Image: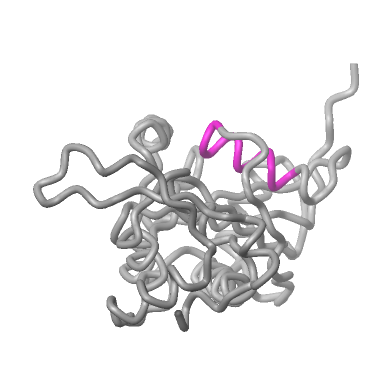
Amino acid sequence: MLSVQTNSAISVDCVIFGFDGENLKALLVRRRNADPLYDDGGYKLPGAMIRENETLPQAAARVLEASTGLKDIYLKQTSIFSDPERVDQDELQWICRYHGIQTDRVVTVGYYALVKLDQGMMNYTRRQGAVWENVDDIHHLIMDHIDILSDALTVLQKEILWSPVAFQLLPKKFTVRQLQNLLEAVFGIEIDNRNFRKKLFTSGILNETDEFERNVNHKPARLYTLNKSAFSKKKPDIVKI
């Protein structure tokens, strides 16, 4: 039986975003079987060389499942990173040795995914040796991964302006405060609470439930769900709400 060959020049790198209720986070991993000669101890984005029998989305989905244990989660292609110098010679030597390939450069395709960051997800990724880091605190990653992360955040910000993608990061039932915290974290801005709530409820994009927060040290807030139909019709700019 023939083994599946790894493409020697194309990879995918995935920015996996999560939200803990206050901060936007990204999943970071250490290089597998790192060679001390070529490893500076830094973190990277989850990624992999593509296989000759899979498409780019299939390769990205494989990386996501390996990183999070999840299938069929929100996944979007961002940009192609093709600078011939994006991988330095030490890094290139490690890639060739690890994958058993020969190449003078690696072009990577960026993707971003959104996951609900609950305790189960935290436990799973911890067992994989991965860490969830606040996006605002990430200043250095190997190769050009900081550029891939920055690009993914820009794409996410643009998508939030016209689609309900932000709700992929929230629990199915959420508080208004959680939604406001998320938007403030993604855009790095402060939103006036009173004005936000007034325009949010006027928009009709939320369905009120009879449920409230549990196990909190303050007055429990009401939980809401997204009214997808209303959002689709109005497409409100929830950042300016």
Q: Nearer the viewer, residue 21 or 175?
A: 175
Q: Is residue 169 left or right of residue 110?
A: left
Horizontal relation, residue 82 to residue 24: left or right: right
Residue under the image location 88 percent in, 38 percent down: 53
Q: Which residues are magenta?
A: 59-69
- Give whichever of 210, 2 is nearer the camera: 210
**Residue occupying the point 31% across, 68% down:** 137
Q: Is residue 8 left or right of residue 49?
A: right
Q: Position of residue 162 (x, y in %)?
A: 64, 74
Q: Magenta region, mostly helix, strand or loop? A: helix
Can the viewer see residue 183?
yes
Answer whether residue 37 is visible to the viewer in this image.
Answer: no
Magenta-colored stretch includes residue 214: no
- Where residue 103 appears, as percent x and y from the top left, is 77, 57
Vertical position of residue 7 compared to residue 112: above or below = above
Q: How is the image coloured?
A: one colour
x and y percentages locating residue 18 in the rendered image:
44, 53
Vertical arrangement, residue 99 with respect to residue 23, above or below: above
Residue at the image position 51 percent from the left and 56 percent from the top: 167
